[in-house]
Amino acid sequence: MDFPFPREFSGRNFPTSEEINIGFPPRTQYYVDGDLFDISLLKCIDLRKAQCNIRDVENIFHPGDGLVMRPLHITDVNKGYLELLSQLTEIGNVSFDSFVEQFRLIQNRTDSYYIVVVEDTTKKIIVATCSLVLEHKFIHSCGARGRLEDLVVLREYRSRQLGKLLLESLRQLAKHLRCYKVSLECKDELVPYYEQFGFQKEEGNSNFLVQRFTPSA
């Protein structure tokens, strides 16, 4: 899947809303370059404080040869981001305009969505991703609850500790953002995997109920 941006982009340059003609106001501050959130937030991550053993990773921003961990960027739509998510769940029909519109919507909620990716810069593809979503509450002194979602690593990269790196990074980010708790949902057979990060099943409170809806045409 390759969406045609109006011109070639290099580095972290990003087309303005006028250039892609979707009617959004110009971006300001650090969002002008197309990152979903301020990358400096990731500086809070210290692997020495990790709950689990993450082998062979010393620099979170460069977790391997040619690999870079960073916030989701709007041009990642052309680097296989949606194809990567399709290994996790159904993507549906996502046009260029709908991707950009959804990205802008999420980006404008500056204190709620933190999607991190790992890019193989030699191949220019996104090989891993995970999301931290904050729910802002009135309870717990107007606190925030964090949810870890949409963890997926490209099959051929699954022996490189990238899943562990993303989970631990977002766990620490949730703590840095003063979440009163962070949770996730997983299949029964994956419970031991997530327990190594400090997650626990709460006695009497471990049921997960769901009701799915089909969006109206």
Image (tube, rainbow, N blue to C red):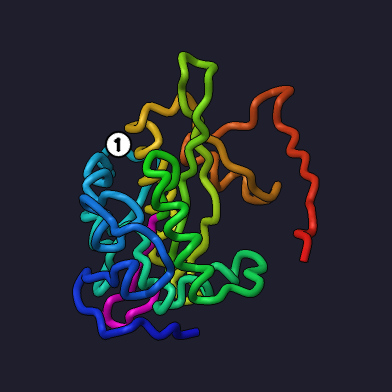
Judge by depth and name the residue closer to the eye, 47 or 55.
47
Relative to 59, residue 85 above or below: below
Image location (x, y in percent) of residue 117:
38, 61
Label 1 Cα crowd, 10 Å radius (few <14 / some 14-19 / many 20+): few
Most foreground residue, 77 or 128: 77
Q: Residue at x 53, y 19 (%)?
A: 138
52 drawn magenta: no
Percent x, y of residue 100: 45, 67
Name the residue at 59% across, 44% down: 192
Residue found at x 36% / y 81%: 5
What is the x, y in percent for residue 45? 27, 42
Q: Quadrant of the C terminus?
A: bottom right
Q: Amino acid at mark 1?
A: Lys
Viewer-proximal residue among 213 and 24: 24
Residue drawn 45% across the image and 52% down it: 106
Q: Position of residue 124 (x, y in %)?
A: 33, 80
Start-end of magenta stretch: 116-126
Residue 161, compared with residue 132, is above or below; it is below
Magenta stretch, main secondary structure, is strand
Q: Please check the rendered image and state whether residue 120 is part of the magenta-colored stretch, yes or no.
A: yes
